[in-house]
Amino acid sequence: MAASMPHAATSALPHVTAARPLPLPVTCPAAKMALCRAGRCGALRLWGPAPPLLAALRPLPVLSLPTKASSRWALGARWLRGRYERFLQRSFPRLYALHSAFTAGLEALLADAREVRQIRQTMAREGLSAAQLNYRDMERLRQFRRDVLKAVPVALIAIPPFANFLVLLLMYFFPRQFLIRHFWTPRQQQQFSEENHSARRAAYAAVLSCLDTAVQSLPEQRLQHRLRELCLQVRRGRHPRVAELCAVRALFSGPALRLAELRAAHVRALSRVLFLTPLLPSVLVRRRLRGHLLEIRHLDGALARLGLAQLSEEELRAACYLRGLNPSQLSVAQCRAWLEQWLGLSCMLQASEASLLANSMVLLSLNYAGAEQ
């Protein structure tokens, strides 16, 4: 009996289990997701699905307040803009036309800037140069660069305090000189194109006179006679053929007529034909002229690869205008025929014969059918 007492006392004591270590906190996102999924499944097995009323009271995703506020502000600004434009159209129609041109021009300028940025990104990503682009991208880059260069002086004038009022006055009274093409009305675009071509056409006689002077110092008598006859026929009103220009192409890469040896008056006259300022020093004028001629040559190569049939009427007329021809009085067929002649000459010339390309802007466009008006 005494032996059984310790065993009974031991069984009467409460059962004590060994202490277990506390679970460590779960920090892994995947483990947390697994535990949450297990908890939801256990709750569904224990309690069943949630009642419909509780399911309907589940919180919905709420839009952030800034998004609602910004959309509300955008709608209000659009409504105010519409009211303002209708007021201008009724009360100040001329001011409304300027306002519409400025708004549309700003949108077009921003669209061009986005397209140019995409072209630049593509060039950087694929390691392309400007000469390897297609025709439309190359032309867009060229035109945007000219617009930016024209806008830089206006931006510099507006830097001093209160000078922006002077800039606004200059833009209003001299839009052709101080505004880029995006902010011109359609009527202004046509008017300024005619004025620019008239100023360019005034330099054609100076180019022919400089050619006559340079012919006298040429060493080869046979080619000298051909070029003199060609200039004489152009003065008399005859349109030259591409074959006649190709026959004297050797002269324009030799002494007296290659671009590096042209007289300063000849270079300045050709710069006016390409809408470049002739007021800079002759070294800079010659350098800019060469750069623009090589750019046109690259454009001609891209245009030949694309094909004239792929161009719209607006693109055809813009291509003719850039190369010295006024297309305002020409039909689409005449523009295409002239561009075929131009490409036939340009694609045969080398970079060293850029002088012939510049002088051909006068020789091929001066007496073309209908281009005299």
Image (cartoon, helix red, strand yellow):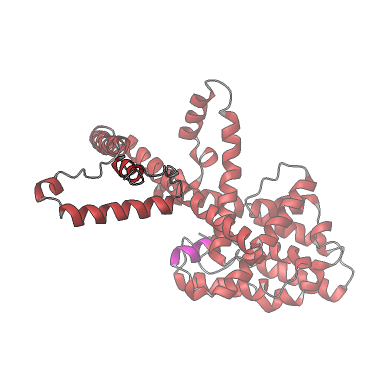
Between 9 and 124, the one nearer to me in the picture: 9
Between 263 and 157, the one nearer to me in the picture: 157
* Any part of residue 49 in sight: no
Which residue is pictured at 66% across the width and 76% down the height?
242
- Quadrant for the N terminus in the image: top left
Say above or below: 203 vs 25: below
Say above or below: 7 vs 127: above
Quarter-of-image position of residue 151: top right
Residue at the front extreme? 1
**x, y percentage for residue 373?**
50, 59
**x, y percentage for residue 180?**
51, 44
* Any part of residue 75 in sight: yes
Tally of marks: 0
**x, y percentage for residue 5?**
33, 42
Between 204 and 260, the one nearer to me in the picture: 260
Specify the segment rendered in magenta: 313-318
Residue 184 colored in magenta in the image? no
Does residue 268 appear to the left or right of 157 in the view shown?
A: right
**x, y percentage for residue 268?**
72, 50
Residue at the top extreme? 161
Quarter-of-image position of residue 121: bottom right
Does residue 293 appear to the left or right of 190 in the view shown?
A: right
Say above or below: 240 vs 27: below
Residue 317 colored in magenta in the image? yes
Q: Main secondary structure of the magenta part?
A: helix
Does residue 313 appear to the left or right of 276 in the view shown?
A: left
Does residue 126 appear to the left or right of 116 in the view shown?
A: right
Which residue is pictured at 31% across the width and 36% down the height?
70
Between 130 and 367, the one nearer to me in the picture: 130
